[in-house]
Amino acid sequence: MSYPELPEPDPGEVLLVCTSYHDGMARWGGLLDEIAGRREGDVLVVGDSGVRLRPIEDHRWNKLHGGNFPALVPDNSPVPPVLVLSDIPAIYGGDGPLLVDLAVIPGRGVRVSSTRLGEILADLLGGVLTFDHLVRDMDVDGMYQGDRGRPAFPALPTAPPRRPFPPLPETDGVLLVRTFFGTDAGWRALLDKLGGLDENGWIGANPDLDKIDMEHYPLTALTVDHRAFKGLLPGHVPALVPPTSRSPMVVLADARTFAIPGRPLTVVDLYDTPGHHTVLPYREVGSMACNLEIRNTDFRDYIPIEPTKPPRKAYH
């Protein structure tokens, strides 16, 4: 299936893209009312911020993830710094619209309160905020300056490397991507712990149902072992996943996997807040994948909440 390119916004405009459709009709829910913008033709001017939002619809964008949209910016057009998605979590989950980075680490996302959308976009476009600010100050729900605490694990670096990464393989399953190449023996030991590789590069493809530990369901994943992905960070992952993929997550085996007991793996969200991540012992990742695939749980359920809420930081 081909996906339409994004239109080029006029100067000072931000695209507000609908990705939820029923019988070809866009479903905005109550988001447009919550934003409380005044209409000027086809544009919403949000509050006192002066931010101009242009709502756009195309049923071919139905259920596309935020990480898919950087590839839809036309080659010869200026790259906008950000776009806003009205997706299923925003419409039905009360999660707030998703801001998608198009310029710095394309594809990563942060949710913001719909009532603060104009204020935050104005600061972002005016240089008062950067996307890194938004990422560093989001809570476990992926909400910028939300009130549910911060991830317990140290944030990984957010600065992008000075080289592009190739696309990840197309599959409807989970990917396990090796990003650290300091120990081949450690990588082989991890794969053995995960059940070993089959001839097609899958782990856990044919589990013995009689021997499965339901507390630690085995991970089924296609492995990616290529030095082109050395140093890959969570924020880069969403834009590398083909739009036909329906997996909710990608798993990274990074430096900490081979240095810390329990072989922790970094799990990257592709759905609720693209690029958001958590770190789990390898034995727990398979159960997480199963639960996310059937929407029995949300990504946020696997991110520990700190016992006390940190003070909000100033923008600078």
Image: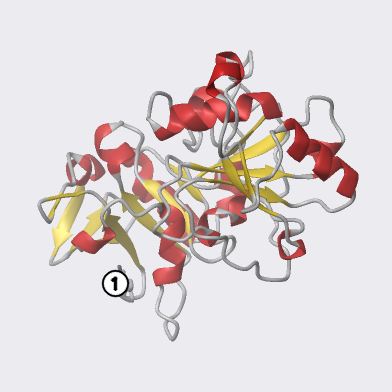
Is 204 above or below relative to 19? Answer: above
Is residue 177 visible in the rendered image? The answer is yes
Q: Is residue 210 left or right of residue 17?
A: right
The quadrant in which residue 165 appears is: bottom right
The quadrant in which residue 127 appears is: bottom right
Is 179 above or below relative to 116? Answer: below
Q: Residue furthest bottom?
A: 76
Which of the two residues, 187 or 69, is positioned nearer the viewer here? 187
Which of the two residues, 83 or 170, is positioned nearer the viewer here? 170
Amino acid residing under circle 1: Pro
> Where is residue 4 drawn, in percent x and y?
29, 72
In the image, what residue occupies the spot 41% across and 73% down? 73
In the image, what residue occupies the spot 68% across and 52% down? 233
Q: Is residue 142 left or right of residue 23?
A: right
Which of the two residues, 265 or 32, is positioned nearer the viewer here? 265
Is residue 140 visible in the rendered image? The answer is no
